[in-house]
Image (cartoon, rainbow, N blue to C red):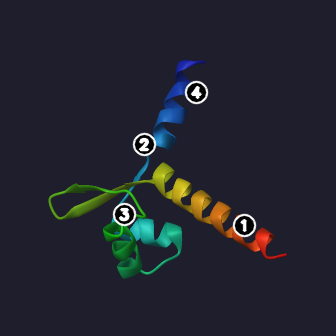
Amino acid sequence: MSASVFNDVWRKYLETLNAKEAADFLKVHYQTLLQMVHKGIVPVARFGRSYVFLKDDLEKVIRSRYAAYWHTSQATT
């Protein structure tokens, strides 16, 4: 793997979002995101009063909820 490809992979993996950006990415209200954080649904790092989200983690949350929904809807058909 070339150095530039390696750097691109790490850059995507470590892309960070603040709470507003994370809420926009998940297409939920800011308060809904904070509720998801407090319930342990969405992983977050906290620095002082700031929340920092990894975009990769948010994508995993979406995939896990999509998979759970898909399996539920398939079981009812």
Say what secondary structure mark 2 lies in.
loop
Query: Which residue is located at x 61 percent, y 58 percent?
Result: 63
Q: Is residue 77 left or right of residue 28?
A: right
Q: Is residue 2 left or right of residue 32?
A: right
Q: Is residue 5 left or right of residue 42?
A: right
Q: Nearer the viewer, residue 16 or 28?
A: 28
Q: Amino acid at mark 1?
A: Trp
Name the residue carrying label 1. 70
Indicate which label's residue lies in the foreground, 2 or 3: 3
Name the residue carrying label 4. 5
The span from disc 4 to disc 3 (Cα, nearest Å) is: 33 Å
Name the residue carrying label 3. 40
Say what secondary structure mark 4 lies in.
helix
Indicate which label's residue lies in the foreground, 1 or 2: 1
Q: Amino acid at mark 2?
A: Leu
For residue 19, which quarter of the picture?
bottom left
Say what secondary structure mark 1 lies in.
helix
Chain-order first, disc 2 or disc 3: 2
For the C terminus, the quadrant is bottom right
The span from disc 2 to disc 3 (Cα, nearest Å) is: 20 Å
